[in-house]
Amino acid sequence: MNHYKSIEPLPLSVIEAARAGDVEAVERVLRYYEGYINKLCTRTLYDDYGHPHICVDEFMKRRLEIKLIHSIVTTK
């Protein structure tokens, strides 16, 4: 079952405001995609004893957020 189908899409007005550079709208877009970005950046790391630890790669998360912001504000 895909629970993403129950999430309402972002209103066009928010997307247009983000494209115009509205900081709050950009933050709303980032929050909307946060779960998806976290899923993409989830990594399994192993400690010295071989025990797995699942965590979000914060560096990769920031890179994806920056790419998303860049694509929002540069798309015409």
Image (cartoon, helix red, strand yellow):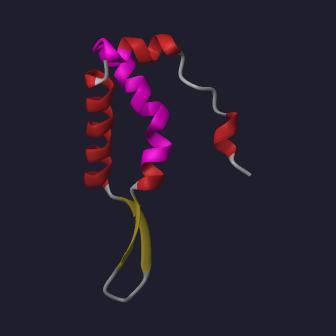
Residue 2: horizontal and vertical position, in percent? 69, 48
Along the line of sight, the residue nearer the viewer: 49 or 9: 9
Q: Quadrant of residue 43?
A: bottom left
Q: Quadrant of residue 54?
A: bottom left
What range of the chain is rendered magenta? 18-37
Q: Answer above or below: position of 54 versus 73.
A: below
Dominant secondary structure of the magenta stretch? helix
66 left or right of 37 in image: left
* Residue drawn at point x = 45 percent, y = 15 percent: 14
Residue 41: horizontal and vertical position, in percent? 39, 56
Q: Quadrant of residue 5?
A: top right
Residue 37: horizontal and vertical position, in percent? 42, 46
Q: How many marks?
A: 0
Q: Answer above or below: position of 67 versus 55.
A: above
Q: Answer above or below: position of 64 versus 21.
A: below
Asked if the stretch drawn in magenta spans residue 34, the answer is: yes
10 left or right of 20 in image: right
* Residue drawn at point x = 36 percent, y = 89 percent: 49
* Residue drawn at point x = 27 percent, y = 45 percent: 62
Q: Which residue is the extreme one toward the right?
A: 1
Query: Which quarter of the rendered picture does the C terminus lie within?
Result: top left
* Residue drawn at point x = 31 percent, y = 23 percent: 75
Q: Which residue is the extreme one toward the front?
A: 76
Asked if the stretch drawn in magenta spans residue 49, the answer is: no
Along the line of sight, the residue nearer the viewer: 8 or 31: 8
